[in-house]
Amino acid sequence: MDMQPLSEFPRADAAAARGVCADIDDTITSDGRLTADAYAALQALYDAGLFVVPVTGRPAGWCDHIARMWPVTAVVGENGAFYFHYDRNARRMQRRFVQDDATRRAGRQRLDQLAMTILEQISGCALASDQSYRGADLAIDFCEDVEPLNDASVARIVELFVAAGANAKVSSIHVNGWFGDYDKLGMTVIAARECLGVELESMRECFVFVGDSPNDAPMFEYFPNAIGVANVHDFRGRIDCEPRYVMSAASGAGFCELAQYLLAARSGSGALGPTDC
């Protein structure tokens, strides 16, 4: 089914939304930067009483900062390896990993070896600049801080991960690989249960997910109200499941478009509280 414009998202459903889960790179950010408008949109959603949960491939070090400093309820990072939630009243960070420390250390050793293989075989790629802040995965940069690689080279990086027995997901900037049976969706379900007291299986229609690239496919498939920023069109034919709706604007401007739509719907309907859905 073709993606529908955001205007087709029923206003009543938008008004009843309890939370927003959002990819970060090229969804909340634009050209590698968090704009003032996008940050203001996050703040407006948070202030309106919505649960705001970034769901990203970015590393643990960044996610610690995001959980502490951004107006968010929690953050899911490294494609589902963990969630972080900062309790502002207790001034305590809750870090919830899928794997225990020993398993992550063993996986790290295997990934370090695999990194050398990938860098040797794929000309022009590099370790992601944020690799040293990662706890559970390996990120190979194919266009963030290197000249963009062609589709065949990106596909070959994925093949090398898979041949080594790792999972591999393509974002708008990196190929992320890891050992373990988890993804963005699985940890989002856990974070919703443990941080929000919400069972997503029975309440998924009360949450909106917004993303832009192939590694968001499990989220696009799971959430009835899944939405893509306009640059999701760049991956047509390469996303296993596309979002139901699509914004007219790309990247952070598209995220702002969604925030405005949700907040306008809530205002027009009397602004439902977080327990109304």
Image (tube, grey):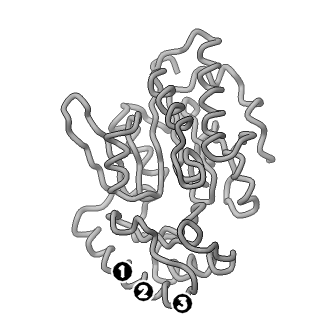
Residue that carries the numbered disc 2 in the rendered image? 116
Report the residue at 53% width, 50% height from top: 33
Whether the residues at callouts 2 and 3 have beta carbons within 8 Å, the answer is: no
Above or below for 273 versus 108: above
- Residue 101 in view here: yes
The residue identified by callout 1 is 112
The type of residue carrying mark 3 is Gln
Query: Residue 205: x percent and y percent?
Result: 58, 32
- Residue 136 versus residue 60 in the image, above or below: below
Task: Please name whichever residue, 97 or 25, is drawn nearer the observer in this view of the structure.
Answer: 25
Task: Assess whether mark 1 and mark 2 are in contact (beta carbons under 8 angstroms).
Answer: yes
Residue located farthest toward the right when viewing the structure as drawn: 2
Q: Which amino acid type is shown beneath numbered disc 2?
A: Met
Tell me if residue 169 comes above or below residue 161 in the rendering: above
Q: Which residue is mark 3?
A: 121
Q: Amino acid at mark 1?
A: Asp
Identity of the residue drawn at 67% across and 54% down:
241
Residue 274: x and y in percent read 46, 20
C-alpha separation, residue under disc 3 versus residue under disc 1: 15 Å
Residue drawn at the location 59% of the way across and 17% of the way down:
266
